[in-house]
């Protein structure tokens, strides 16, 4: 698991409802952000990777570029699963 917050340390459960358009936008932004950060974490652009790491450190982030990329991928996967689960009971119209 790449997220800082670990299962079993939950104190509350919160549900939010967002419309499909916003959910899609969030998924796309997370996927794009994960791709950019994953590229930085791989060292493809050393100067940019150093700057990204320095920015996280300056922000007192508990993440490194690599762990942030992993966490974003994990959250994106969770959201995709939640979306599939939310629509699994819906029967498409005939001929669709």
Image (cartoon, rainbow, N blue to C red):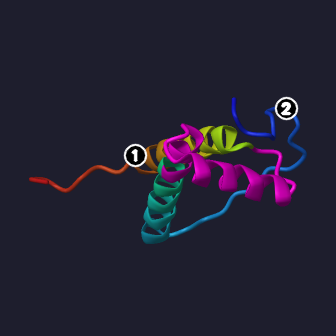
* Relative image position of residue 52 (x, y in whole percent): 67, 54
Give the residue at x 79% y 50%: 13
Give the image quarter of residue 93: bottom left
What kind of secondary structure does the magenta stretch mostly adopt?
A: helix
Q: Residue at x 69, y 34 (%)?
A: 2
In the rendered image, residue 45, in percent from the top left (x then y), is placed at: 52, 48
- Which quarter of the image is occupied by the C terminus? bottom left
As helix, strand or loop, the secondary structure at mark 1 comes to: loop
Query: How many numbered tags mark residues here?
Result: 2
| Part of the protein shown in magenta | 36-63
Number of other residues with Cα within 10 Å of mark 1, as a class: few under 14, some 14 to 19, many 20 or more: few
Give the x, y percent position of residue 14. 76, 56
Q: Nearer the viewer, residue 43 or 22?
A: 43
- Quadrant placement of the N terminus: top right
Left or right of residue 15, residue 62 in this image: right
Q: Which residue is mark 1?
A: 89
Query: Residue 8 got which mark?
Result: 2
Residue 74 location (% of width, % of height): 59, 39
**Do callouts 1 and 2 mark residues in contact (Cβ within 8 Å)?**
no
Residue nearest the viewer, comparing 84 with 65: 65
Q: Is residue 28 magenta?
A: no
Is 61 in front, or is 24? 61
Q: Residue at x 43, y 62 (%)?
A: 24
Residue depicted at x 9% and y 53%:
95
Q: Is residue 13 above or below residue 18?
A: above
SS of the residue at dot 2?
loop
Let me know if residue 47 appears in the view.
yes
User: Distance of mark 1 from mark 2, alpha carbons?
Assistant: 29 Å
Q: Is residue 1 above or below residue 77?
A: above
- Would residue 3 be found to the left or right of residue 74 on screen? right
């Amino acid at each position: 698991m790449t997220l800082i917050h670990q299962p079993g340390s939950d104190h509350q459960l919160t549900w939010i409802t967002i419309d499909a358009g916003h959910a899609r936008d969030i998924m796309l932004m997370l996927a794009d952000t994960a791709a950019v950060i994953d590229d930085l974490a791989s060292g493809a652009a050393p100067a940019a990777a150093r700057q990204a790491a320095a920015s996280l450190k300056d922000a007192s982030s508990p993440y490194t570029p690599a762990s942030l990329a992993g966490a974003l991928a994990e959250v994106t996967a969770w959201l995709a699963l939640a979306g599939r689960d939310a629509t699994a009971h819906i029967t498409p119209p005939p001929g669709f």
